């Protein structure tokens, strides 16, 4: 293989970046060769996006150097990075939907004649650039009218036309169907043959194996390892991504007896196109049901569907035996279902409101008239139960640490006395002490006959508290693990897709 | 493009309906008068088109028209300046107010509606400080310009205001299509974030957009002065709303990114036609204009909503 | 964690400074005399004149807190004033002249308030149901509203003389002018509404994080609609006061530019213009501060047009100050978001 002899196109050394309260990158090393596709993998908060942001100038590192083609660079903005030859295509395609395809390719570098922009030449050059990549699309079409997959190809064409040597693709395949992915891969192979260096951020293992030459795995801001893809087997990759708790290899839950009661929540072949399929399970009182799988495997998508955030396209959902045809968050709250969403900052907390209001929001939202004294009582009780550390109840919640914010969100639901709680990564981005407190709390809730659905990227956590686990892989519910099978090793195997 | 046809359709339908309903309506004279009577609104609306295309708003237009009108009249009549320096002074004034808006919006990132609403106060305040009374303009050069016209036989005349209006539309259409500034205006309206990620100058473009709008409404004030031969501090009250309505009826979205100079011209002419119809009818009072314009505005906004049913961003994963 | 200075301190300090200045310039500033059992004096006058803005800013505070804006309040004032005046005076040519309410001021006011709420509902449905941007949605009524008011008055200034109705704007109760009572009671009711019921928190929640609000099962559409209806209702009250004060309905000039004063009062009072946290008391102080400024300037012989400019300068300064604080906070949040 030529990999070992070519000098690196990009060499990042000792990259660290601290955001308040979290060390997003901790001395990360990364190198990219020309003519390779280098996958970057890791779960939420692993540091993938921070690393790309550093490389493309969107944020500046606190420490570390970046060397491109032998010269040290310090891009200050994405535009700056683009000038240096680092092109990036974001997941949501940062182009202009209101302009034509041709303009999106050429904007900022329009060919000019004496009278201003030479439109004929612009479209000719743009269509050349697209043809070179084998993309067939009219350059006069409005970008916004085209599917996301085509928009992505247009964005790549723009980056390539700007003589980029490095192309960064951030989750390019997450909204593409199979045929579109094939097309993208064909194009990437093509670019690799032209000696371009491609960083491919993804969470799809299959795709990674199909297209990449090397893969770097990050976890919690640290580099776990870089391997040649051909030398790394699936289980090893997955265990790098999910990590194993040292000294607690193979944690299994203390098995609680699940009472053979009527299920409170049931699904039958639930799904929606492009999101997740084949979700079928029964959730009983007093159990913690784990959803395990990688990011993008369908676990969070299922939660969103269960809570009525995203529409259900097929299958059935029953709560306490009653079919729910068109769920909405409002309806689910009234059915005493609660949700701790995945993205705490954007979906859960009210940053400028006080801790007190944040804790009471679900109760208030249901239009309940509660006396001031009762409110104070509830807030004080949960503050003590959850051990929320804050300067005062009137402190705006954005000033609190992530762990305390998460506890407040949990308290909000507990105050409303739910029967079912959907918890999407409730332990993400919080310190270790708070993590154990929350896990302990969840177990005690199950003792009190609540039914919990628990999603976590940390297999160890799922193994510790779940009585059953559903395995998600490639947007499908693949498997259900029960009893002693709910352990790290078995879950890992199923997630990686090894046959049992 | 399609919305341009919709606007053209609405305009033609209104004009045709009026031609059938009122004898004497269908004539070149009425059509040309549409340009003359709405020139000041049109010129200002052209400036506003740039602002709205970029996703902003300028509420100071009416006040600017009143202010630059009275400023010019005072310079000419009270201070006895000659026409050229007076006009230059007014344009500079428009430039300065626009630059102030631009700086506050682009650099300090204040919301455009608030900044330009404050600008509205400032302009009205300055105008009233200059003179509370209306001022007749009798400067010979100015009068000569206002009387300049090209007769098209017996059918009608093209007046100086109309010429300025058409000229402004032409220039704006050219700039929007063929200059990189024009394309950055569209880009900004499409997505500010993407524009800056694509390496386009955002702050500078924004600044010049508001400068342009300030200058355009100053020109609008001058055209108003030519048209009425008298400066008035309270002229153009509420005109910003007509201008916004014209731009929206011309096919622009207030979130930015879509619209055109020609569309705005058609929007202005549509408003003018409504006005003319009401004058022709004689039974309808002037306030029906506002109500009709409001309804048309509503119709276009709702139609946009239905056609571009954009999924609410917060709901997608 | 450092204790922050509450935002309300600044407008209060400014208000105090203004009072001290006035006292130095005019020793009789705080003087309140009693004539025929009515209180007179600069302070009373300021509050009396501030009443319409106070009412508008009360509604505006809630609208802004949900992340919206209501530009139509001036036009709504004009419409509601016209409704009340036309019902009372029944001028020839007015389409409302067909209704005979036998000169009942109560019915006239009731009708005006009802119309104000309907107009507010119109705004609210456009914003909350049809998802039209608040600026655009309320701009529609800002355009058409004056036209509707002129339609109702058939373009004339409707003059009336109706002792009962006049007394709303010019009369006294318990020694104080009625507008002060109306504005204060409205504020008080609003205060009770946001403090004693969950409504206030829900309003903030909608503005602070609409996504999270939805996931908490809050009915955002209803909350948003209600605040616009309230804004319309309060604008109607302001319109009635303004109309009865001058004993005439002037469709063109009533409430002109008052929407800016109201927005300004909210901004000065420390409410975030992007939604979320709000302070009714802050807005109250803001509105009073603005009126004191105007009155002071007028008393010093400053022409009203200069006052206009000064007000604009004040708005911009306040906003720049706010945005400075805001940007620091935003940076903080963005950093937390990254990684």
Image: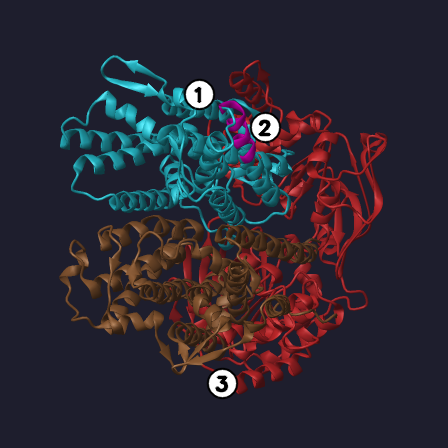
Chain colours: A red, B cyan, C brown
Compared across the picture, whether C214 is left or right of A245 comes to left
Q: Are marks 1 and 2 on the same chain?
A: no
Say few, some or many: other residues with alpha carbon within 10 Å of mark 1 (under 14 / 14 to 19 / 20 or more): few
User: In the image shown, does C289 or A444 lie closer to the viewer?
Assistant: C289
User: In the image shown, does C196 or C184 lie closer to the viewer?
Assistant: C184
Q: Which residues are magenta?
A: B83-93
Secondary structure beneath dot 1 equals: helix
What x and y, as percent, mark residue A171? 62, 44
| Chain designation of label 3 | A
Q: On the image, numbered disc 2 is attached to which residue?
A: A107
- Disc number at residue B141? 1
Say few, some or many: other residues with alpha carbon within 10 Å of mark 3 (under 14 / 14 to 19 / 20 or more): few
Who's the residue at 48% across and 58% down the image? C261
What x and y, as percent, mark residue A210? 65, 39
Say few, some or many: other residues with alpha carbon within 10 Å of mark 2 (under 14 / 14 to 19 / 20 or more): many
- In three-dimensional space, the C-alpha distance between marks 1 and 3, rounded to whole angstroms, equals 77 Å
User: In the image shown, does C255 or A62 lie closer to the viewer?
Assistant: C255
| Chain designation of label 1 | B
- Disc number at residue A371? 3
Residue B146 visible in rendering: yes
Compared across the picture, whether A284 is left or right of A33 comes to left
Compared across the picture, whether A186 is left or right of C172 comes to right
Who's the residue at 73% across and 69% down the image? A251
- In three-dimensional space, the C-alpha distance between marks 1 and 2, rounded to whole angstroms, equals 45 Å
Callouts 1 and 3 close, C-beta under 8 Å:
no
**Which quadrant does the N terminus of chain C fall into?**
bottom right
Q: Are marks 1 and 3 on the same chain?
A: no
Residue C129 visible in rendering: no
């Amino acid at each position: 293989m030529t990999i070992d002899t070519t000098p690196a196109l990009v060499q990042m050394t000792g990259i660290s970046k601290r955001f308040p309260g979290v060390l997003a990158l901790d001395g990360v090393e990364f190198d990219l060769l020309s003519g390779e596709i280098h996958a970057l993998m890791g779960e939420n908060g692993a540091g993938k996006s921070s690393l790309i942001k550093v490389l493309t100038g969107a944020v500046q590192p606190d420490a570390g150097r970046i060397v491109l083609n032998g010269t040290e660079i310090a891009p200050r903005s994405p535009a700056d990075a683009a000038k240096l030859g680092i092109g990036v295509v974001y997941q949501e395609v940062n182009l202009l939907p209101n302009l034509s395809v041709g303009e999106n390719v050429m904007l900022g570098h329009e060919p000019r004649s004496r009278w201003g922009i030479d439109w004929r030449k612009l479209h000719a050059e743009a269509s050349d650039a697209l043809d070179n990549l084998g993309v067939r699309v009219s350059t006069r079409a409005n970008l916004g009218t085209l599917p996301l997959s085509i928009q992505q190809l247009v964005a790549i064409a723009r980056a390539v036309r700007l003589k980029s040597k490095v192309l960064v693709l951030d989750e390019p395949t997450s909204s593409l169907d199979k045929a579109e992915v094939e097309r993208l891969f064909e194009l990437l192979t093509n670019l690799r043959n032209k000696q371009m260096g491609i960083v491919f951020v993804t969470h799809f293992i299959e795709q990674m194996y199909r297209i990449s030459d090397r893969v770097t795995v990050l976890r919690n801001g640290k580099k776990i390892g870089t391997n040649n893809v051909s030398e790394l087997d699936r289980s090893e990759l997955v265990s790098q991504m999910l990590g194993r708790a040292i000294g607690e290899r193979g944690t299994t839950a203390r098995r609680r007896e699940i009472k053979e009661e009527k299920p409170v929540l049931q699904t039958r072949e639930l799904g929606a196109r492009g999101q997740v399929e084949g979700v079928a399970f029964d959730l009983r009182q007093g159990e913690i049901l784990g959803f395990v799988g990688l990011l993008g495997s369908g676990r969070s998508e299922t939660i969103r569907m269960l809570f009525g955030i995203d529409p259900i396209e097929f299958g059935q959902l029953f709560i306490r035996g009653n079919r729910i045809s068109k769920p909405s968050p409002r309806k689910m709250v009234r059915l005493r279902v609660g949700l701790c969403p995945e993205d705490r900052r954007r979906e859960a907390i009210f940053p400028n409101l006080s801790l007190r209001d944040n804790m009471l929001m679900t109760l208030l939202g249901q239009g309940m008239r509660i006396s001031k004294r009762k409110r104070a009582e509830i807030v004080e009780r949960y503050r003590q139960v959850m051990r929320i550390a804050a300067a005062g109840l009137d402190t705006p919640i954005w000033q609190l640490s992530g762990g305390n914010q998460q506890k407040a969100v949990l308290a909000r639901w507990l105050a409303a006395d739910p029967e079912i709680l959907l918890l999407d990564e409730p332990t993400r981005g919080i310190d270790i002490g708070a993590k154990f407190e929350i896990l302990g709390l969840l177990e005690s809730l199950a003792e009190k006959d609540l039914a919990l659905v628990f999603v976590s990227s940390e297999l160890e956590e799922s193994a510790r508290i779940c009585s059953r686990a559903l395995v998600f892989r490639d947007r499908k519910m693949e498997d259900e693990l029960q009893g002693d099978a709910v352990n790290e090793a078995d879950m890992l195997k199923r997630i990686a897709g090894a046959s049992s | 493009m399609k919305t341009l046809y919709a606007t053209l359709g609405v305009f033609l339908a209104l004009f045709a309906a009026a031609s059938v309903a009122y004898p004497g309506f269908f004539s070149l004279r009425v059509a040309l008068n549409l340009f003359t009577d709405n020139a000041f609104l049109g010129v200002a609306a052209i400036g506003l088109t740039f602002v709205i295309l970029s996703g902003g708003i300028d509420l100071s237009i009416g006040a600017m028209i009143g202010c630059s009108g009275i400023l010019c009249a005072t310079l000419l009549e009270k201070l006895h300046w000659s026409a050229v320096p007076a006009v230059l002074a007014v344009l500079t004034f428009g430039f300065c107010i626009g630059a102030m808006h631009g700086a506050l919006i682009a650099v300090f990132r204040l919301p455009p509606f608030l900044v330009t609403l404050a600008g509205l106060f400032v302009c009205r305040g300055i105008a009233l400080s200059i003179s509370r009374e209306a001022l007749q303009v009798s400067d010979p050069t100015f009068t000569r310009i206002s009387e300049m016209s090209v007769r098209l036989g017996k059918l009608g005349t093209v007046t100086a205001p109309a010429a300025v209006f058409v000229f402004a539309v032409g220039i704006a259409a050219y700039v929007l299509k063929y200059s990189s500034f024009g394309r950055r205006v569209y880009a900004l309206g499409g997505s500010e974030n993407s524009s800056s990620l694509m390496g386009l100058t955002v702050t500078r473009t924004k600044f010049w957009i508001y400068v342009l709008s300030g200058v355009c409404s100053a020109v609008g004030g001058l055209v108003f002065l030519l048209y009425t031969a008298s400066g008035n501090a309270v002229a153009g009250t509420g005109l910003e709303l007509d201008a916004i309505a014209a731009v929206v009826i011309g096919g622009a979205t207030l979130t930015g990114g879509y619209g055109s100079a020609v569309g705005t011209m058609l929007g202005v002419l549509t408003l003018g036609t409504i006005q003319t119809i009401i004058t022709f009818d004689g039974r309808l009072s002037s306030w029906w204009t506002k109500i009709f314009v409001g309804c048309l505005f509503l119709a276009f906004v709702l139609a946009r909503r239905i056609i571009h049913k954009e999924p609410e961003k917060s709901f997608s994963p | 964690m450092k204790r922050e200075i509450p935002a309300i301190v600044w407008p209060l300090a400014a208000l105090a400074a203004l009072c001290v200045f006035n006292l130095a310039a005019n020793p009789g500033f705080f003087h309140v005399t009693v004539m025929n059992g009515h209180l007179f004096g600069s302070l009373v006058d300021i509050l009396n004149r501030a009443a319409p803005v106070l009412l508008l800013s009360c509604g505006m505070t809630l609208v802004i807190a949900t992340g919206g804006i209501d530009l139509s309040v001036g036009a709504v004032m004009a419409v509601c004033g016209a409704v009340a005046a036309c019902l009372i005076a029944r001028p020839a040519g007015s389409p409302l002249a067909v209704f005979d309410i036998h000169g009942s001021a109560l019915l006239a006011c009731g009708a005006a308030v009802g119309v104000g709420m309907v107009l507010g509902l119109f705004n609210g449905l456009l914003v909350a149901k049809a998802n039209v941007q608040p600026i655009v949605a309320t701009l529609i009524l800002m355009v058409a509203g004056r036209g509707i008011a002129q339609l109702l008055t058939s373009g004339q200034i409707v003059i009336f003389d109706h002792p009962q109705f006049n007394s709303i704007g010019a009369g006294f109760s318990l020694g104080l002018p009625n507008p002060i009572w109306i504005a204060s009671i409205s504020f008080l009711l609003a205060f009770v509404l946001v403090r004693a019921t969950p409504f206030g928190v829900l309003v903030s929640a909608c503005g602070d994080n609409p996504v999270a609000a939805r996931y908490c099962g809050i009915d955002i559409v209803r909350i948003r609609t209600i605040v616009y209806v309230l804004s319309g209702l309060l604008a109607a009250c302001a319109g009635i006061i303004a109309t009865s004060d001058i004993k005439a309905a002037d469709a063109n000039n009533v409430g002109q530019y008052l929407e800016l004063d109201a927005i300004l009062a909210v901004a000065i009072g420390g409410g975030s213009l992007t939604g979320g946290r709000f302070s009714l008391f802050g807005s109250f102080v803001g509105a009073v501060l603005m009126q004191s400024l105007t009155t002071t300037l007028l008393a010093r012989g400053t022409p009203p047009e200069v006052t206009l400019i000064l007000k604009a300068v004040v708005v911009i300064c306040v906003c720049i100050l706010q945005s400075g604080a805001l940007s620091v906070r935003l940076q903080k949040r963005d950093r937390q978001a990254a990684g």
